[in-house]
Amino acid sequence: MTMRRLIQLASVASAGLLLAACSSTSLRVGGAPDASVKNCVAVAARELRVPPGSIIVDSGSTPRDGVYTINLKVGPQGRSAVCTTDENSAVLGVVYKRPE
């Protein structure tokens, strides 16, 4: 296998992983819009300094009208975090939950 072919295969594989990571958040979680879920994953990756592929959307709820709470599992240990967004899908905050 030539080096060019190896690079092409690696590019296709990484594009597939990125697509899978982005599409894994396309489900509605606790009534939160898809954009809220995607924004939470993006902000959590940046704020918590982890790759977006290591964040799993766990569950969500709407505790107040127009504010969505999305529970996340972060990293290989599955550490719990929570993200809140407003009705416009803007992220209000991302924090780790205290271990119980």
Image: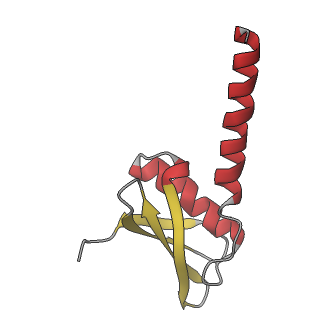
Residue 4, percent across and down? 75, 11
Give the residue at x 41% y 54%: 75
- The answer to whether residue 18 is above or below residue 43 is above
Residue 33 in the image: above or below residue 78: below
Residue nearer the viewer, 4 or 52: 4
| Residue 26: % across, % down | 71, 66
Q: Residue at x 66, y 44 (%)?
A: 17
Left or right for 21, reference 96 = right
Q: Is residue 69 visible?
A: no
74 versus 62 height, above or below: above
Q: Residue at x 72, y 48 (%)?
A: 19
The residue located at (68%, 27%) in the rendering is: 10
* Colour setting: secondary structure
In terms of image quadrants, where is residue 90? bottom right
Q: Quadrant of the C terminus?
A: bottom left
Vertical relation: 37 (above or below) 52:
below
